[in-house]
Image: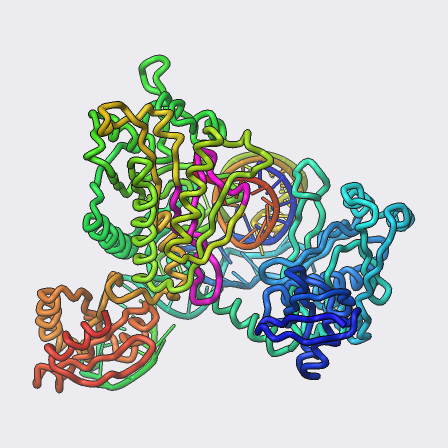
Amino acid sequence: MINITLPDGSVRQYEKGTSSHEVALSISEGLARNVLAAKVNGEVWDSNRPIEGDAHLQLLTFKDHEGKTTFWHSTAHLMAEALEALYPGVKLGIGPSIENGFYYDIDLGDRTLSSTDFGKIEQKMLELARQKNDYVRKDISKSDAISYFQEKGDEYKLELLEDLEDGQITFYEQGNFVDLCRGPHIPNTGSIKAVKLMKVAGAYWRGDENRKQLTRLYGVSFPKAKELKEYLALLEEAKKRDHRKLGKELELFMFSEKVGAGLPIWLPKGTALRTRLENFLKEEQIKRGYQPVITPHLGKKELYETSGHWEKYGEDSFQPIHTPREGELFLLKPMNCPHHCEIFGHKPRSYKDLPIRIAEFGTVYRYEQTGELHGLTRVRGFTQDDAHLFCMPSQLKEEFLGVLELTTYVLKKLGFDEYTAQISLRDPDNKDKYIGSDEVWDLAESAIIEATKEVGLTTTTELGEAAFYGPKLDFMVKDALGRRWQLGTIQVDYTLPERFKLEYIGSDNAPHRPVMIHRAPFGSMERFIGVLTEHCGGKFPLWLQPEQFAILPISEKFNDYAKELENDLAASDIRGFIDDRNEKIGRKIRDAEVKKVPLMLIVGEKEAENRQVSVRKQGDGDVGTMNLDDFKAYFKTLL
RNA sequence: GCCUUAGUAGCUCAACUGGCUAGAGCAGCUGAUUUGUAAUCAGCAGGUUGUGGGUUCGAAUCCCGCCUUCGGCUCCA
């Protein structure tokens, strides 16, 4: 007998060789039906794989992340089976699950595939799914595996096999389809009830642009048709909230071919919104001892040679600007830190002055590749809510904690309640990519890990994701539709102070090197506002709205009263406008609704006589008639 | 940068296989209407079809380059 420990801590006894499916069955039949895979001692297994010893067991359904990914990966195999059936001779690359579904990279030979073929493939997949074929795991020797794919003529699988060790190779088989695969898989194709192919795109074999381009076919699948329907509705909603669409409709920002791709132009309403956001953060930073500074948009090439940016990014960035003077070169600044290092270094610093926190909404320019540009979230000119904190090594943790406090405060204030923090460390196998000594890196990495632990932040750790000068902590926020975005960032840097030879005089009267923290709670104003727009679907928090109300006179006769109201509200710091067009009230309401103006004040004869307003809330409808003081009080409750 | 989608009026979209003066709604302008909770009516104006070449008797439509753009790959200090 073996002991199986379940997540709730209970221990059950089973025959040696019992599968997790059988364990599920012993608990309830319904559960067994929904189990897609199981985590056995932390490793995801096929649910029908026998467990040979004592184990911790977690049964995985579609509700679990690993259950989903297993389900999707199995659907990728199903799609491959369908493709082989429909297009004999296709060769297969890899077919993993991804965040929202799965893909398979395929070599179609001379054929092409477009979205018009999706229906046919989906039908075939569902037809094969209905055969309820089991996914069967088979151990296979390397030589047998090689001869199988040689016979099949699939050079991609053969290449994958080169990296695998004999004795660890498994095949999975379902129906007429066999694939090289580590697994795990769901028990049976029958649970795949709804399938939708999403898009085709080109993708290089193994991500290498010098190699052949394969066709990547994306799809998503669900155990229930209803879940697919809900997912598609979510995508529809996401489309409606696309910040590029809303930005145009609400006249927040624009792009111009003449100005240049990736260079956002802020329109008056967008500027009003952005300025409020900036002022909010500026005030919070001053409360926390930051000192605002302003630095130029360019700097001499030597500055970036000192910082190391020139060496690292010189050729891939905007090229130097020449001046009438021979040999004089300036660069548009790609970062604010070199300028801020100069500020630190401009006079002798005492340990008593530390920490020094220098803040700037600094606009930087980076030549992103053409294919990367995307609305406000990926641009070539953007403004960082940047600050650099210079401190003694002994102050590092406290400063880091302070930045964590500010960042989480700011996110909460803007309605981002769900977030995790990603700790990005060096790639231990490829240390040449980074500048700075091992010792210094170790210090910085452990400072981040300790501080996040101390405040109890949910973190994930990624190796190889660090910046070239130091490790970082990125905030990944979840928006209203459950999508994840990277926003704020905090980076510890021992390298730049070294390169700029920054010093302070310690209590021992000797020079010491400060530590530097780069941080930006929003990340960039552009990206943040892009994400915020999608998060709130264009209905920004009232305090940020460029126009908080619209006064809608029933007819032109009441324009004077409307003007009085506007002045009165302006005096109370409530901003808005009068729609004094010669239009019917229904029309004015509709236009205000479409423009997402939060509050509509309808004034006609009744209101003018009684010195009142009829209030209507965007999206909610009529709120009632009230006098102006009551409206102001009501307004405050909405802030 | 690479592959892929597309580019027609300020916006959203038409224009059959190359063929009459490139159309419509909204927005704009002018006039009428003076309006009670999501679009009042009429008229007017608006385009070198992204751009530069080419093919053709004839190009929005076909071909090539470039720019911009959708989606993806690679990248993201």
Which residues make up the magenta segment? Answer: A463-491
Q: Quadrant of residue A3?
A: bottom right
Residue A392 image offset from top left, x and y in percent: 29, 35
Please state the total of marks drawn on the protein image.
0
Residue at 79% x, 42% y is A159
User: Residue A242, located in which quarter of the rendered image?
Assistant: bottom left
- Residue A633 seen in the current view: yes
Q: Quadrant of the N terminus of chain A?
A: bottom right
Comparing A103 with A571, the one in front is A103
Assign the C terminus of chain A to one quadrant of the image: bottom left
Q: Is residue A346 left or right of residue A373?
A: left
Question: Residue A197: in sight, yes or no?
Answer: no
Picture coordinates of residue B56 (x, y %)? 67, 42
Q: Residue at x 26, y 23 (%)?
A: A510
* A394 over A329 or under it: above or below: below
Residue A121 position, x and y percent, is 74, 65
* Image point (35%, 40%), residue name: A518
Left or right relative to A600: residue A179? right
Looking at the image, which is closer to me, A347 or A327? A347
Write the residue at 30% across / 75% down: A618
User: Does the magenta segment cover residue A557?
Assistant: no
In this picture, residue A460 sits left or right of residue A176: left
Rendered image coloring scheme = rainbow
Task: Give the vertical position of A300 relative to B43 (above or below).
Answer: above
Residue A389, x across and y down, in percent: 29, 39
Relative side of A469 to A631, left or right: right
Q: Residue furthest front?
A: A1
